[in-house]
C-alpha cells in the first residue's frame, strides 16, 4: 500500500505535533494513528526526538479531517488523495468515489427513516403504565424476534 503524502516542506521552522493538532483540529493520537496506517508520512525528529511537521502536513491533515467529517472512510480518502496527486487527477474517478459514497449515505438515511418509523410506532403503543408487556422492551428483546 503506497504512502500518500504531499511533498516535504522545509523543516527549519518545524511545527510540533501539539501545534499541528491545534492548527488542523486533529487529535494528537489520531495524527499518530494516521502515521501508523501510512496516511501521513512519519515526520523527521529533532535531536531531542520530537516530531516536527511542515505546512504540507497541515494541508494533508485538514483534507483528511474534512473527508472524515463528510463520512468518507480512510480507504476512500486514500484513493482521493492518490487521485489528487500531480498528473493523476481525474475528475471522473473522484466523481465515482463521491457518487458511491452518496449512495451509501442515502441508504443509511433510508434505514434511519425505517428505524424512526418503527420506534415512533412502538412508543405510540406504549401506555406508560406499569405492565408486564412493554412494546419498547419487546422490540429490544431478542426472544421476541
Image (cartoon, rainbow, N blue to C red):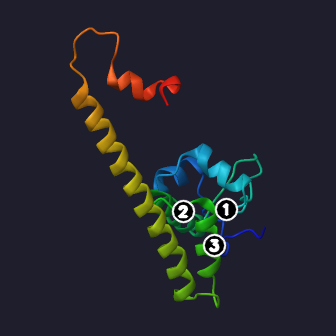
Label 1 element class: loop
> What residue did someone put label 2 on?
64
Comparing labels 2 and 3, the label whose residue is closer to the camera: 3
Question: Residue at 66% of width from left, 56% of height from top?
Answer: 52
Q: Please tell me how crowded label 2 is: few (under 14), some (14-19), or many (20+) other residues with Cα within 10 Å.
A: many
- Total marks drawn? 3
Label 3 element class: helix
Q: Give the quadrant of the N terminus.
A: bottom right
Disc 2 to disc 1, how far (Cα)? 9 Å
Tell me whether circle 2 and circle 1 mark residues in contact (CB < 8 Å): yes
Point out residue 59 in the picture as x, y percentages from the top left corner.
53, 68
Q: Earlier in the sequence, mark 2 or mark 1?
A: 1
Decide which of 137, 80 is in the foreground and name it. 137
Disc 2 to disc 3, how far (Cα)? 11 Å
User: In the shown orientation, is residue 33 left or right of residue 22?
Assistant: right
Point out residue 57 in the picture as x, y percentages from the top left corner.
59, 64
Tell me whether circle 1 and circle 3 mark residues in contact (CB < 8 Å): no
Vertical comparison of 97 with 92: above or below: above
Question: Residue at 54% of width from left, 54% of height from top?
Answer: 20
Q: Earlier in the sequence, mark 2 or mark 3?
A: 2
Decide which of 113, 73 is in the foreground and name it. 113
Residue furthest to the bottom: 87
Numbered badge on residue 39: 1
> What residue did someone put label 3 on?
79
Vertical comparison of 106 with 143: above or below: below
Point out residue 32 in the picture as x, y percentages from the top left corner.
66, 49
Comparing labels 1 and 3, the label whose residue is closer to the camera: 3
Question: Residue at 70% of width from left, 48% of height from top?
Answer: 50
Quadrant of residue 90 in the image?
bottom right
Numbered badge on residue 131: none
Vertical comparison of 42 with 80: above or below: above
Vertical comparison of 34 with 103: above or below: above
Amino acid at each position: 500500500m503506497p504512502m500518500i503524502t504531499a511533498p516535504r516542506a522545509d523543516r527549519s521552522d518545524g511545527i510540533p505535533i501539539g501545534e499541528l493538532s491545534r492548527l488542523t483540529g486533529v487529535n494528537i493520537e489520531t495524527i499518530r494513528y494516521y502515521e501508523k496506517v501510512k496516511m501521513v508520512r512519519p515526520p523527521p525528529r529533532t535531536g531531542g526526538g520530537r516530531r516536527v511537521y511542515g505546512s504540507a502536513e497541515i494541508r494533508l491533515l485538514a483534507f483528511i479531517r474534512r473527508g472524515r467529517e463528510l463520512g468518507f472512510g480512510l480507504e476512500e480518502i486514500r484513493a482521493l488523495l492518490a487521485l489528487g496527486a500531480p498528473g493523476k487527477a481525474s475528475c471522473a474517478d473522484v466523481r465515482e468515489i463521491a457518487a458511491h459514497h452518496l449512495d451509501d449515505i442515502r441508504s443509511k438515511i433510508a434505514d434511519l427513516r425505517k428505524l424512526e418509523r418503527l420506534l415512533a410506532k412502538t412508543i405510540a403503543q406504549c401506555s406508560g403504565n406499569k405492565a408486564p408487556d412493554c412494546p419498547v422492551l419487546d422490540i429490544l428483546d431478542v426472544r421476541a424476534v
